[in-house]
Image (cartoon, rainbow, N blue to C red):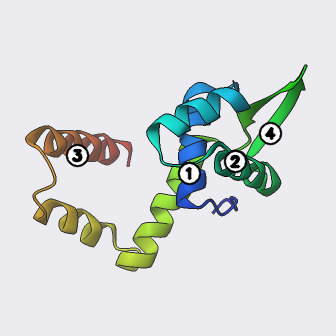
Amino acid sequence: MVKLPQISEAEFEVMRLVWDQAPVNTNEITEQLVQSTEWSPKTIQTLIRRLVTKGALTYEKKGRVFVYTPAVEESEYLKVKSSSFVEHYFKGDITAFVSSYLESDAHSESDIESLRSILSEQTGKQ
């Protein structure tokens, strides 16, 4: 499994924005997160600095502005975190995880159809 930086929930919110909009500068990140969270601009800038220090973000200085891009691919991060989640909470048993999800009422018929489609595709690959 690929070793990725540990990213907190708050840092993940910053990463989500950068993944969606990269390249993105400090002011753009701050403006958007001030509107969608209760964080101060100083808190947001601290989160950005932490992500740079951890190696999750890279930056380039353009004039007086820092422009950020992800150093970690979103798909890779989500794949590793998903596997880690299943391993930690379900002892690696994906069937137990899916069963737990399906037993909740947190899904729609289209969710079930999507799962069927994914499983059919995976079965065809083997």
Tell me which numbered mark, 3 or 1, is placed earlier along the sequence: 1
Helix, strand, or loop for circle 3? Answer: helix
Q: What amino acid is at disc 1?
A: Phe
Spatial separation of the CA atoms under disc 1 and disc 4? 15 Å
Residue at x 63% of width, y 41% of height: 73
| Residue hosting label 3 | 115
Neighbourhood count class around disc 2 (C-alpha, 10 Å): few under 14, some 14–19, many 20 upward: few
| Residue hosting label 2 | 42
Q: What amino acid is at disc 4?
A: Thr
Image coords of residue 88 (percent x, y): 45, 77
Tell me which numbered mark, 4 or 3, is placed earlier along the sequence: 4
Image coords of residue 27 (percent x, y): 69, 28
Helix, strand, or loop for circle 1? Answer: helix
Residue at x 15% of width, y 40% of height: 113
Q: Is residue 56 visible?
A: no
Tell me which numbered mark, 2 or 4, is placed earlier along the sequence: 2
Q: What amino acid is at disc 2?
A: Lys
Tell me which numbered mark, 1 or 4, is placed earlier along the sequence: 1
- 2 or 46: which is nearer to us? 46
Rendered image: mark on residue 58: 4
Please say if the residues under marks 2 and 1 sit with CB atoms less than 8 Å apart: no
Number of numbered discs overlaid on the protein picture: 4
Image depth: mark 4 or mark 3 in front: 4
| Residue hosting label 1 | 12
